[in-house]
Amino acid sequence: MKRKHKRLTFVAIALTLLGAATALVLSAYEDSIVFFYSPTDLAEKKIADGRRVRLGGLVEEGSVKKAGDAITLFRVTDLTTTVAVSYKGLLPDLFREGQGVVAEGRLKAGVFNAEDVLAKHDETYMPPEVADALKKSGKWQDQEKDKGKTK
Amino acid sequence: MIAEIGHFALILALLMAVVQSTLPLIGAHKGYESWMATARPAAIMQFVLVAISFGSLTQLYLTSDFSVLNVVQNSHTAKPLLYKIAGVWANHEGSLLLWVLILALFGSAVAVFGANLPPKLRARVLSVQAMIAVGFYLFMLLTSNPFERIFPAPINGQDLNPLLQDPGLALHPPMLYLGYVGFSMAFSFAIAALIEGRVDAAWARWVRPWTLAAWCFLTGGVALGSWWAYYELGWGGWWFWDPVENASFMPWLAGTALLHSSTVVEKRDTLKGWTILLAIITFSLSLLGTFLVRSGALTSVHAFATDPARGVFILGLLIVVIGGSLALFAWRAPALVSTGVFQPISREGALLLNNLIMATAAAAVLLGTLYPLFLDAIGGDKVSVGAPFFNAVFIPLMVPMIVAMAVGPMLSWKRADLKPAFSRLWAAALAAGLLMATVWVIKTDGPFMGVIGAGLAVWLFAGTGVELAERLRLFKVPLSDSFSRLRRTPRAAWGMTLGHLGLAITIAGMTGAGSWRTESIQAMKPGERVTVAGYEFIFDGAKDGIGPNYSIVEGTFRVFKDGKAFVTLRPEKRIYNVSKRPTTEAAIHTTFFGDLYAVVGDKDPNGAYVTRLYFNPLVAWMWGGVIIMIAGGGLSLTDRRHRIGAPAKRTGQGAAVAQAAGA
């Protein structure tokens, strides 16, 4: 086999694989991209029930209730709009009232059924999505001020 | 004082790296031997200086010197010794210092052990190494100085994030960095070869052990991270396609491809341009991984409060390194002439197929990981790309690769025939088919992926076994002959066999844990019982206790199997004294067939605790398979051609070479 042929075969295989990969990527994208919404977005954009989305905001103070059977009810707020959330399972260690949270799940009859509540690993850390959601609602207070003191 | 010594040593190391990155390079170009000769002492000096700097920071942690900001933010007097040491690299600044320490260590290793390298190549390699180092030193000194002082000094520190106070995670960063930085050697050799315009088998023999060592460390680092997520996060999963996991997985995929293509360069003197490109890509992905994780652009455990100046510097450095090296590649690669030719159906062809699939997989993971960042940067929607995407793309790519993996080693170099290879693999195909049918019947309601995964694992395991048996001519010649063949087999070949067997076992583990997990979440009062996968868990309630720097709530589950006491599990919930942060410690009992996994949560007003109980089949196989893969890599590293510098060719000739080398 000549060099030229070898190269051609190489290029052909590479292109086929890339094509296959792209096709796989595109077909996969249909349902594997999860959009992120703040409670206000969720209310305004009329998200269809049953579509998997991420909801981010603060856990409203005083809203967390244990409903038995390992179900926890709480409300997520961006300080403008509030959404009721129901979650069955163990909440992450740093889940607390007044703190930022990101929940992934589906909206059903006005209640957000969370399938995952994402762990936050550092309590001084705010997920960028949540910070942005709060900034958008104009309720963001710069928490960096506190940190400045230690420097 | 110690902080100032560390800081000063770091500045000196930067200056040394500047010298090392310029003089030898100019010397090699102009042919000034004395200039080239500066590379080795400079590399060794640079290492000594960084070691002083790193030692200083470690000393500051050990003595809990709270006049240093970094120590304040990440340490506490009450922290156990192991985590005082691990605290050094469990933060942004310290981990960068560890990065450059390893970089300088590898550079000095080339200086010390590289006596048999051509002087020009050595000078250029060390020079490129120093260029990378200069970028990192500048980044540290300008934006991330670990020795910054704080006044007035607080009485005590803020403690290390409790999630990171864990033995698995104490070792995870050094392992991962040894891998990332190890690929910098392949990168430096690649750039030096491009400057020189020459790649030969001797070059590949140098690059291969570094790539292999880096690959072993990276494999270990990724597995440790996964293991940590499995037992520490309490979700019972071991891989989440989280962006930070992907960040370490992409260099692994590219590095695995590089490992295989460098064999072709060494043995067959072909695929040179591709191997150089892979070396560049692998290290670029390592850099991207380091920074993606450290920059805070991603929501995860590794994200630290960020400083905009850092982001800009990082972006600049990435553009210079990746853009510069790719431009150099485009300009110089045509000069690399390959002499070996091969048919598509051949060992080379199979290795190339591996390379293409691995590269495609790395590209797909990269796309999925960066897509949300791109979309956000251009002001689009906020999205996240989750496990469904990665599973849908990655798994179909791996299926043909694993099928081919059993066949590839049966093919001869240059040209081969598929028919005899397949005819020898009939036993493997039969075993795979039988197991798939069995799984299909037993786990009818399980996911179809389970059937495929089980088949692939057996196919690869048996196929690799058949290849080994063929090599030893087992049962075709007397056993004593087979035994002597066994002893003569080069260790690199053993490395391949173990690596592939290990992967087969790992795939079996992943299939089990991914497809047939049993999970049960409920609120339990003391005395209540739940049955999970045939094991009966009786909850005996929870009690308080005290650990070294935390308090605990410890739940007790007695587990029964077939009415007989099997094991007692004691999961904990810890509250760390300083930060008041809780962590979850799952209780795991590992058996050959699977892990019993229990987590206890908060108490509700009725006196019931939320509990999460799992049966995760075959998890131990995953870790065991990874250990076998790393052992294979390690064994291959000790192959005689890496020690002596001459490949053991075919019998007869090889003996002559060995004699010559021994004489």
Image (spheres, coloured by chain):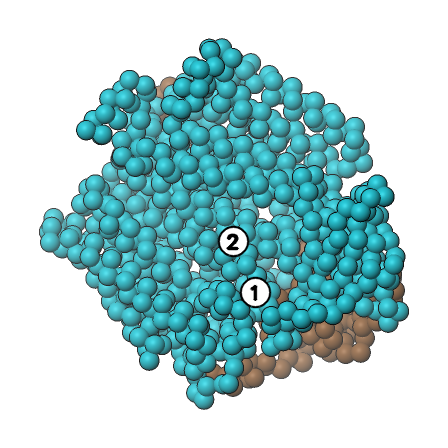
Q: Residue at x 11, y 50 (%)?
A: B33
Look at the picture and state if B338 lies above or below A88.
above
To which residue does mark 2 refer?
B247
Mark 2 or mark 1: name the one nearer the start of the chain. Answer: 1
To which residue does mark 1 refer?
B165
Image coords of residue B427 (percent x, y): 60, 18
Query: Viewed as shown, does residue B157 lie left or right of B323?
Result: right
Q: Colour of chain B?
A: cyan
Say which element carries label 1. loop
Q: Chain of mark 2?
A: B
Mark 1: which amino acid? Gln
Q: Chain of mark 1?
A: B
Q: Colour of chain A?
A: brown
Look at the picture and state if B109 lies above or below B63.
above
In front here: B607 or B191?
A: B607
- The quarter in which the N terminus of chain B is drawn is bottom left
Q: CA distance from mark 2 to mark 1?
A: 22 Å
The answer, for residue B376, to whether it is visible in the render is no
Look at the picture and state if A72 lies above or below B174.
below
Mark 2 residue crowding within 10 angstroms, few (<14) / some (14–19) / many (20+): many
